[in-house]
Amino acid sequence: MKRIEKLLERIITRVNLNLRDASFDVRPYIRDIVPLDQLMKFYAFYGISPNHPIHFHFSNSNLAGSYFLGQCKVDNSVLYKSDIRGDELKEKGAVFHFRGTDIQLEDDEVIWIKDSFLIKTLVHNYSHNPEKLDLFLIKNSIAAHYANIHGSPIEGCFLGPFSTVDLSSLHDCVVGAFSYLQVGELSHKKIRPGRIWIRAKDMFDFDYRYNPEILRKYIAFEPGKGTMGMFMDFAEDRKLDFQRLYDVVHLDPHISMPKGASINRYALLKGKNHISENVLVAQRAFLESAWLGKGANAQENCCISYSRLESFDITAHGATIIYAHLKNKVFVGFNSFLQGKSDTPLVIGEESIVMPHTIIDMKEPVSIPPRHLVWGYIRNNNDLKEHSISLEDLAKVSGEISIGAMRFKGSGEQFVKAFQHRVEHILEANGAFFDGEKGRGHAQKGQEISFNIIQPYPEGPFKGIYPAIDINP
């Protein structure tokens, strides 16, 4: 057995040990999900920037097509076309606030991925585990296509395709396809596909669950069959377009760059696009005939096609926007899929919040009013009534409320404030408010990154394994 096959077997065994109490066997889900020859053919690449502490350590791993930034360690793992973006890791001396307690870091934080298999997965933000503030650990875990691990250490977990674990900490959990979790901490739980769960203890609890039959049209993951559905087909259709970005070392700039804006070297633009000041376009983002206003952004694995985004709009990791017009300061959450029509674009009013993992697949003209929260599955205006509420009305809730399949309890005011605060934080972190001197963020710092590539052994028993590498400043 070749070294890489032994490595995959090691990962499967360790993940299954962690999930033994859940009676969940990962083997039939990931067997042949990525053919071995795919793990041999792509180089990995890492960014060097004066704005972030760097230290890369790779040992006994395959890193095919993956991207690294910041301080990252990878041991005994397979990372296939994943993005390990450590530009928000906490630095030595930083103070972490947790439930009224201030904790100062003694060391720079590092992302450490050990005995894990990540497939087209994003890892970003920083650890929200107060017990290990300087370590963003992913151990004995598997994440399938287009999962997001955002500020969430995980140990012994399985994340289904297009799932998101956000600002949480998970232990020995199974998270179904297209589920979104922001729950603080969770242990030994199985989350069914299509559950959207946001919980802040003693403050609020938002819970929505997709109809399994409806969800299946868009995304499904079955043993022996892999990932299926419209979302996967849509993502796979863009593979060839992206391939040319990796076939050459240097690309000439393909668009003039206004002040404070940056487009990552590994983002793809087609058609005629407009980029305004302080716009951020991250790696693996796809723009096609898109108009992005001041301070707008398109994060990793986003797709914005034939759409206009006004100022300070946020397109979070993995979101897709097609034939839409977003007014000022609209938030579109992780892995949401918004599809209007060429003759009747989807319109979203200013300061509205599209919840993570929302599906809007229009069958008739739909306009979302300003300052509304929307979630779930929307095709027409009747669906919109059952999947939306004004932020003003939600802020008045104190107790419990049900709208369609959504259940909310707690303080609506705290929920609204938490989301609005996060929108401001994201805009600030991305440099949307940069004035030429103050407010530098990812958009401005992204102008100062160079990329180096690394490749695996091409033949022999180590074929596909990358040599042990330790890269210091």
Image (cartoon, rainbow, N blue to C red):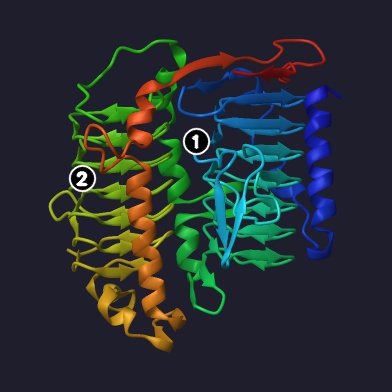
- Residue 68 position in % (x across, y down): 56, 28
Q: Which residue is mark 2?
A: 307
Q: Amino acid at mark 1?
A: Asp
Residue 299 in view of the camera: yes
Q: What residue is shown at x 64% (from left), y 19% (from top)?
A: 472
Q: Mark 1 or mark 2: which is in front?
A: 1
Q: Secondary structure at mark 1?
A: loop
Q: Quadrant of the C terminus?
A: top right
Instruction: Tell me which label, 1 or 2, sits earlier in the chain.
Output: 1
Q: What residue is shown at x 43% (from left), y 46% (from top)?
A: 317
Q: Quadrant of the N terminus?
A: top right
Q: Residues within 10 Å of mark 1 (few under 14, many from 20)?
A: many
Q: Are marks 1 and 2 in contact (CB under 8 Å)?
A: no
Determine whether 295 is above or below 218 in the image: above
**Relative to residue 37, is residue 217 drawn left or right?**
left
Q: Which mark is residue 87?
A: 1
Residue 320 in view of the camera: no
- Residue 471 position in % (x across, y down): 65, 18
Q: Amino acid at mark 2?
A: Ser
- Residue 271 position in % (x across, y down): 21, 29
Residue in front for this viewpoint, 338 or 373: 373
Determine whether 454 is above or below 297 in the image: above
In which image quadrant can residue 117 be found?
Answer: top right
- Residue at mark 1 to residue at mark 2: CA–CA distance: 28 Å
